[in-house]
Image: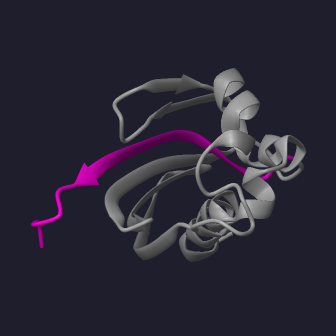
Amino acid sequence: MSDASDVQGAVDGELRLMHPVVRSSRALALELLDPEFVEVGASGRRYTYEEMIAGLPDKPGSSADGPRYEPSDIRGVLLAPGLVHLTFETVFAGRRARRTSLWRKRDEETGWRMYYHQATPVPPDTA
């Protein structure tokens, strides 16, 4: 695989995780989150894999008729074989956040899975 296809695999997973159908399904989220997953949310709270799988269907962005994450400027870098770093920005319900995630691929069967995610709120007056 090329660097570009590895990065695209991670981007595809990131976009899937923002989709309400995936967010509302623990089974689909299990396919995209690494068992060693950790998140530091925009609130500063730390989430484990177990907490995220249990709570994702109730989190914002999980309802088909509610607000959706609007990602922009997604960039990725292959850090090492099987490890991609993504950075991007989202708008959700009028609030901006800068985000970063690490995606890892242990084998072809499991594919790309999010290993780490962090969100940082962007103040309204920031360019």
Q: Main secondary structure of the magenta part?
A: strand
Residue 111 at what x, y percent from top left? 78, 53
Task: Report the magenta residues as a range.
Answer: 110-127
Picture residue at 68% right of the left edge, 61% below the top: 13
The reply, left or right, for residue 88 in relation to residue 28 is left
Q: Along the line of sight, which residue is nearer the eye, 73 or 45? A: 45
Q: Along the line of sight, which residue is nearer the eye, 44 or 79? A: 44
| Quarter occupied by the C terminus | bottom left
Q: Is residue 64 above or below residue 83?
A: below
Q: Can residue 113 be found in the magenta stretch?
A: yes
Residue 118 at what x, y percent from top left? 41, 42
The reply, left or right, for residue 68 in relation to residue 117 is right
| Quarter occupied by the N terminus | bottom right
Picture residue at 71% right of the left edge, 22% below the top: 50
Q: Along the line of sight, which residue is nearer the eye, 31 or 69? A: 69
Picture residue at 36% right of the left edge, 35% below the top: 43
Q: Is residue 68 above or below residue 102?
A: below
Q: In the figure, residue 45 lies in which quadrant?
A: top left
The reply, left or right, for residue 111 in relation to residue 27 is left
Q: How is the image coloured?
A: one colour
Residue 44 at what x, y percent from top left? 34, 30
Q: Can residue 117 be found in the magenta stretch?
A: yes
Q: Along the line of sight, which residue is nearer the eye, 30 or 83? A: 30
Residue 16 at what x, y percent from top left? 70, 64
